[in-house]
């Protein structure tokens, strides 16, 4: 965004030419070395294993897995749940991020605390808590019956709806925080300027605020989707054995069936799905933020 | 035992195997003798309170109990195949079969384990590779507030009155396997023993259970929470060692023994091949198979004894039929069953 009238008040952000070697880039070395050893190398081993059959390197195990309709059902479960969780997080998280960015003083500290504090509660504890909340006599069911939306208590526990509600709760902070970080940087005078030019609140949001916050949305979506597509503990506890996802199938293949071939195949497919989304959304973020804002 | 030097290990190993012949134990006893036992984390309490003191008193050696999961014990044995440090393993039978296939176990013989002769039939497996020291049994656990009358048959979980109220274990849990045999018996009219061959009718019958299922569990404590809170009314099948312990702790649940009979769960014990202190390892196994210790263990473990001379715990009918599971068959078929189960029981 080339905001013509925006006065330069703060320090000018440094621009690092990416093509010229920079000593500062060395700062990334410890993290890079750690990830290369603890993530990159095992990943290569996993890839190699998923492609090596009894007759050497082949795509046969992958083809065999993908020729089974049940596998597509598992992939479908995985992607659909992750998309629904991401959507719920976005719809609930965006307004929260706006409120967080607009709040001041103690109000903001309190809101920020309420977003970050849940991250310190273990995911197993949360999953167990959802079991109590989602029960037939739990508060969700009671609220729906009390407000007349439901005629009688229904089962939420061990359904896909219950899983999406529970998982969205676990991952919501990962949507709120990146969007909040971007909104904070928006010059509040931009929507104000639009207002003085007669734009309605909706138009101001759609043409000014939303485009400016898109990079935050994209990174929030990438975060939540890649966490939700690979979640293991939450589905194990909230929906159980009857709803297999790529992550739970991978765990079962390695831990119980001792079928390393199947386990590495499902793990690689899961990885491919997650990488596609992260790379795709990063490219999208770069295009959207390419005007100079990000 | 990282502090032991290889030389000393070798001495101990040699001494242990020659022990009976040359009375070397007298010399070895001068050093601290240790036996490492690998078992289930859930067994730690009764092993350390009852078994270990009895063993240490009798044999003057220290016992270290490493409580984890059966498959982790198997890994420990595989990784240390050349220099085993575990002496005895207490694992479920399905994992024992894997250990036998890998050649990790030293067979039990009546000469080294005299109490083998006192065991009930069907509790010594694969030519003495391992034995069952206790048998928790599998029945139907139910919430006593939701159900006035105890379930009486393996057919009860299929009753339409229990729509959405029944929990079954996953097939990946050992205690989940009898459901296939119970379903096969119900569908075919065969006995629970005869139903373990062709389970095709059982899978078709299980599909009829789907409307009644609240969930299929892999985490046992989670399932019992739901049962105790009344969200679930029944767990079929349920392990005595867990259900009766919760009942004793005051939970509003009970365990019913269906009229067709109950299944015995496989608590196996075996000696690790090439272990240090083999004499101690066999002595430990013999102690656990002996009448005196089993008498003391059936109460706290809510299990059936395997020693013929020990009576069943109080409250269990002497007429209750106990069916053994053909674990070698299970080991062959299990992966296929799990794959089929995933497809047919999916939401």
Image (spheres, coloured by chain):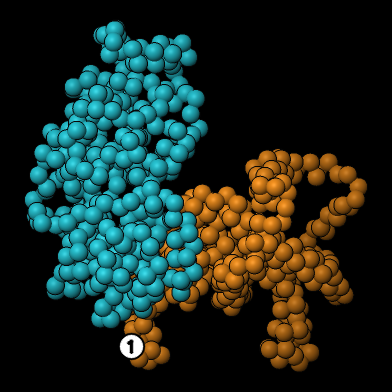
Q: Residue at x 63, y 56 (%)?
A: A265
The C terminus of chain A lies in quadrant: bottom right
| Quarter occupied by residue A75 | bottom right
| Quarter occupied by residue A149 | bottom left
Query: Relative to B114, is A143 above or below?
Result: below
Q: In this view, does B109 lie to the left or right of A168?
A: left
Task: Pick the residue in front: A127 or B214.
Answer: B214
Residue B184 in view of the camera: yes
Q: Residue B177: x and y, percent?
A: 35, 58
Q: Residue A182: x and y, percent?
A: 69, 68
Pinpoint the chain carrying mark 1: A
Q: Residue A266: x and y, percent?
A: 61, 58
Q: Mark 1 points at which residue?
A: A152
Q: What element carries label 1?
A: loop
Q: Residue A82: x and y, percent?
A: 58, 70
Q: Which residue is drawn at 13% across and 33% down?
A: B292
Query: Relative to B295, is A117 above or below?
Result: below
| Residue that lies at the very extreme toward the right in this rendered image | A20
Task: Pick the residue in front: B154 or B55.
Answer: B154
Q: In the rendered image, what is the letter of the chain coloured cyan? A: B
Q: In the rendered image of this protein, which colour is used for chain A?
A: orange
Q: In this view, does A50 lie to the left or right of A18?
A: left
Task: Pick the residue in front: A220 or B119.
Answer: B119
Q: Is residue A294 left or right of residue A247?
A: right
Q: Which residue is drawn at 38% across and 64% down?
A: B199
Q: Residue at x 83, y 59 (%)?
A: A12
């Amino acid at each position: 965004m080339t905001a013509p009238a925006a006065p330069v008040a703060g320090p000018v952000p440094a621009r690092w030419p990416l093509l010229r070697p920079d000593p500062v880039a060395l700062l990334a070395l410890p993290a890079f070395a750690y990830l290369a050893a603890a993530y990159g190398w095992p990943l290569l081993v996993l890839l190699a294993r998923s492609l090596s059959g009894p007759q050497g390197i082949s795509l046969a195990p992958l083809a065999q897995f993908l020729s089974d309709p049940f596998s597509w059902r598992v992939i479908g479960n995985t992607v659909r749940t992750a998309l629904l969780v991401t959507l719920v997080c976005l719809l609930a998280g965006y307004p929260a991020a706006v409120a967080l960015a607009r709040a001041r003083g103690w109000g903001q500290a309190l809101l920020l605390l309420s977003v970050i504090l849940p991250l310190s509660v273990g995911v197993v504890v949360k999953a167990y808590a959802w079991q109590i909340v989602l029960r037939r006599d739990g508060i969700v069911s009671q609220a729906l019956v009390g407000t007349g939306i439901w005629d009688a208590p229904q089962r939420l526990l061990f359904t896909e709806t219950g899983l999406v509600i529970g998982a969205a709760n676990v991952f919501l902070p990962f949507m709120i925080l990146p969007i909040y970080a971007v909104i904070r940087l928006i010059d509040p005078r931009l929507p104000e300027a639009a207002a003085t030019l007669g734009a309605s609140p909706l138009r101001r949001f759609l043409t000014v605020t939303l485009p400016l916050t898109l990079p935050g949305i994209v990174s929030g979506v990438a975060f939540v989707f890649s966490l939700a597509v690979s979640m293991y503990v939450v589905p194990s506890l909230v929906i159980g054995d009857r709803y297999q996802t790529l992550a739970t199938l991978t765990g079962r293949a390695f831990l119980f069936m001792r079928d390393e071939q199947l386990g590495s195949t499902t793990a690689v497919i899961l990885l491919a799905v997650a990488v596609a989304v992260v790379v795709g959304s990063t490219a999208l973020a770069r295009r959207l933020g390419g005007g100079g804002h990000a | 035992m990282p502090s032991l030097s290889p030389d000393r290990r070798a001495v101990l190993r040699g001494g242990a195997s020659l022990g009976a012949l040359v009375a070397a134990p007298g010399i070895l006893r001068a050093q601290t003798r240790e036996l490492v036992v690998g078992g289930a984390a859930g067994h730690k309490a009764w092993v350390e309170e009852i078994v270990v003191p009895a063993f240490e008193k009798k044999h003057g050696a220290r016992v270290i109990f490493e409580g984890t999961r059966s498959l982790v014990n198997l890994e420990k044995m595989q990784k240390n195949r050349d220099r085993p440090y575990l002496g005895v393993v207490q694992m479920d039978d399905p994992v024992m079969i894997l250990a036998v296939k890998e050649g990790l176990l030293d067979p039990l013989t009546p000469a080294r384990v005299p109490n083998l002769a006192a065991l009930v039939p069907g509790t010594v497996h694969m030519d003495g590779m391992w034995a069952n020291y206790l048998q928790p049994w599998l029945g139907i656990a139910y919430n006593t507030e939701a159900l006035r009358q105890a379930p009486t048959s393996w057919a009860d979980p299929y009753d339409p009155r229990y729509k959405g109220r029944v929990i079954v274990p996953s097939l990946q849990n050992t205690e989940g396997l009898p459901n296939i045999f119970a379903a096969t018996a119900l569908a075919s009219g065969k006995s629970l023993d005869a139903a373990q061959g062709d389970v095709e009718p059982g899978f078709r019958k299980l599909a009829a259970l789907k409307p009644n299922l609240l969930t299929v569990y892999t985490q046992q404590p989670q399932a019992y929470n739901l049962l105790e809170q009344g969200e679930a009314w029944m767990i079929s099948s349920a392990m005595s060692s867990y259900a009766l312990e919760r009942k004793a702790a005051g939970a509003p649940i009970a365990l019913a023994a269906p009229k067709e009979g109950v299944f015995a769960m496989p608590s196996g014990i075996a000696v690790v091949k090439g272990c240090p202190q083999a004499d101690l390892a066999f002595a430990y196994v013999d102690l656990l198979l002996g009448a005196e210790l089993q008498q003391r263990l059936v109460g706290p473990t809510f299990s059936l004894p395997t020693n013929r001379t020990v009576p069943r715990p109080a409250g269990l009918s002497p007429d209750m039929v106990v069916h053994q599971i053909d674990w070698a068959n299970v080991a062959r078929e299990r992966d296929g069953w799990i794959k089929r189960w995933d497809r047919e029981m999916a939401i």
